[in-house]
Image (cartoon, rainbow, N blue to C red):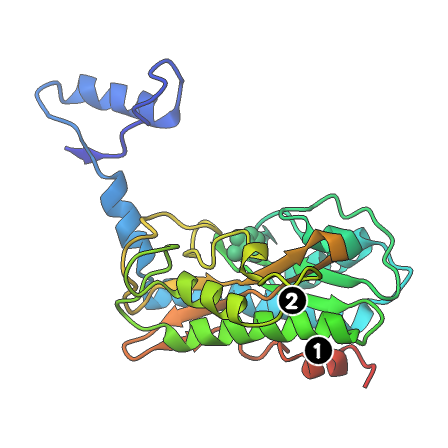
Amino acid sequence: LYTILPPPRDPEACSFERDRVNRLRKLAPAAALRNAAEAMARLRQVKSETELALIEKAVRASMAAHREAMKAVRPGLYEYQVAALMKYVFEREGCERPAYAPVVGSGFNSTVLHYSANTRRMEAGDVLVLDVAGEYSFYAADITRTLPVSGRFTPRQRQIYEIVLGAQKAAIAAIRPGVTVARAGPNSIHKIVVDYLNAQGKDRLGEPLGKYFIHGLSHHVGLSVHDAGPVTRPLEPGMVITVEPGIYIPEEGLGVRIEDMVLVTESGARLLTESLPREAADIERAMGRR
Ligand code: GLY
Ligand code: MN
Ligand code: MN
């Protein structure tokens, strides 16, 4: 009998799975129980048309929130005001809840991974990392844009922005069935990004930038924002992943992340977040400062 078995560690922990397994053992004492968790996680990695439609609904609502944020961001606003606006917009567009704690990090906070206090008042000259998205019918979106708070990137901010965007484009161009998102191994798109970052630009000490990319490049998205299943599995058509390179230079108070969502197709990748401004000039235009 295949079911979800409780985690093997911590046999004392009381869990939903444990209660159900105990009931199954009473109902079917002769049956051998086997774990279906891994098979289900693998099934979850390939989306059906129905699942894809729900993900796209979450993506559309979340992109609307990002567009409104681009129009609203200016010096003097607090980070939480941007978070509140974005939550309002994606919920107005049908999402039930945020897909994860919104990250609205300006200035130094742009370099802090998982920053979600969102308490700072934004200043002219800051960059602002907006990692914010909603969940629709239990399916997540996961989108990041980096904006200049004043509406125009400084030359240094723009230089770093272009490098992150170039790395992201190189990774997306390489996506096709068979590549992997794991950090190493054959056909790793993570490695493409690290090599790109190391070949472009420098920090203040003249060192390459790859060391400032301090997290994974991609993860599956679905019923969980970091969806189930092995990351080492080669990509297949129907999988939905993020592509989210970033450079975070604390000594410059400068963090840039660009996170888009991609559907793996038979021949490559379809960018689900294509209609959201991503080029530096398009972001400045969307902010109304060009
Ligand atoms: N927002 C969570 C992540 O980007 O993985
Ligand atoms: Mn992500
Ligand atoms: Mn994210």
For the residue pair 241 and 175, the one nearer the viewer reads as 175
The image position of residue 66, as x and y in percent, is 68, 68
Label 1 Cα crowd, 10 Å radius (few <14 / some 14-19 / many 20+):
many
User: Vertically, is 30 above or below 238?
Assistant: above
Q: Which mark is residue 145?
A: 2
Residue found at the far top of this picture: 12
The image position of residue 227, as x and y in percent, is 41, 50
Residue found at the far left of this picture: 30
- Could you tell which of marks 1 and 2 lies nearer the N-terminus? 2
Can residue 84 be seen here? The reply is no
Quadrant of the rendered image containing residue 126 = bottom right
For the residue pair 259 and 108, the one nearer the viewer reads as 108
Q: CA distance from mark 1 to mark 2?
A: 9 Å
SS class of the residue under badge 2?
strand
The amino acid marked with disc number 2 is Arg
Image-based side of 183 in relation to 109, left or right: left
Q: Which mark is residue 230?
A: none
**Which residue is depicted at the point 41% across and 56% down?**
220
The image position of residue 256, as x and y in percent, is 66, 63
**Which residue is depicted at the point 66% across and 70% down?**
160
Image-based side of 219 in relation to 123, left or right: left
Can residue 44 be seen here? The reply is yes
The reply to whether dot 1 and dot 2 touch (C-beta < 8 Å) is yes
User: Vertically, is 219 above or below 284?
Assistant: above
User: Vertically, is 65 above or below 135?
Assistant: below
Quadrant of the rendered image containing residue 67 = bottom right
Q: Disc 1 designates what residue?
A: 283
The image position of residue 103, as x and y in percent, is 67, 52
Residue found at the far bottom of this picture: 290
**Which residue is depicted at the point 68% across and 79% down?**
280
The amino acid marked with disc number 1 is Ile
Label 2 Cα crowd, 10 Å radius (few <14 / some 14-19 / many 20+):
many
